Image (cartoon, rainbow, N blue to C red):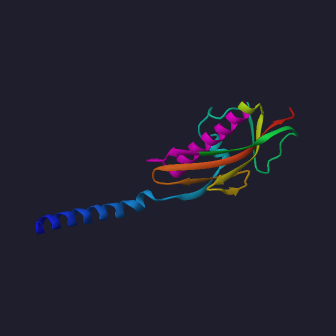
Amino acid sequence: MKRHLMFVTSIAFAASFTMLSAAPAFARDTVGNYPIEEALHSEPGKVGDDIALYFAGQHHPAVVKTIGEFATNKKTNAFGKSDAAACQHVFLSAVIELQDRARKEGGNAVINIKSNYKNEVRESATEFTCGAGAVIAGVALKGDVVTLRK
C-alpha cells in the first residue's frame, strides 16, 4: 500500500510539473502592429481588386449608399511561423472576408476599416493590430460596406 501511494504521488507530481512547465510556452499572446501595405502585398493575387478597401482616415469617393458595418475575427495556425508572417496571412483572410461580405451585400467598397483586436478599436490608415501566440495568430477588423460613386 505504501509503495502504491508513493507511486501515485510521484506520478501526480510529475504530471503537475509537466503541465506547469509547458503552460507558459503556449500562453504567449504578443499584440503588435504591422504595416497594412506590406501585408496586402505579402501574398500576390489573394485580395481581389473589385472591392475597394479604405482604412480609417483614408479619403475615398463619395458614398452613394451605406449598407452597414461588418466585423471579422480570423485566426490562423502560427506554429513554426514568424509573428509577422502569421499576422500578414491572417490579416489577408480578414480583408477577404470583408470583401466577400461587400459582394454579398451588393457594395463596391469597404471603408473606415479599423482593427478591433479583443474589442480594442485602433484606427490607422497604415497599420493593423494582430495577436500572435505560439500556436495561433488572430486579427479582428471592422468596416463599413458601402457603394461608392464611380
- 147 on left or right of 6: right
Q: Position of residue 60 (x, y in %)?
A: 83, 42
Residue 8 left/right relative to 44? left
**How far across and down, in percent of the image, does residue 83 sit?**
52, 52
Occupied quadrant, residue 6:
bottom left
Percent of width and height locating residue 128: 66, 51
Judging depth in this view, the residue of 35 and 22 nearest the camera is: 22
Q: Is residue 64 above or below residue 56?
A: above
Residue 26 appears left or right of 43: left
Looking at the image, residue 139 lies above or below residue 20: above
Pick the front one: 128 or 20:
20
Tell me residue 138's x, y (percent): 56, 49
Q: Residue furthest front?
A: 1
Total marks in image: 0
**SS majority, magenta:** helix
Q: Tell me if residue 136 comes above or below residue 50 in the rendering.
A: below
Q: Is residue 28 above or below residue 71?
A: below
Residue 13 among those drawn in magenta: no
Q: Residue at x 11, y 66 (%)?
A: 1
Residue at left 48%, top 47%?
A: 78
Residue depicted at x 64% and y 37%: 96
Which one is nearer the viewer's eye here, 145 or 35?
A: 145
- Asked whether 19 or 136 is in front, the reply is 19
Q: Quadrant of the C terminus?
A: top right
Magenta span covers which residues? 74-103
Please report the residue visible at 70 percent of the width from the left and 56 percent of the height from the top. 122
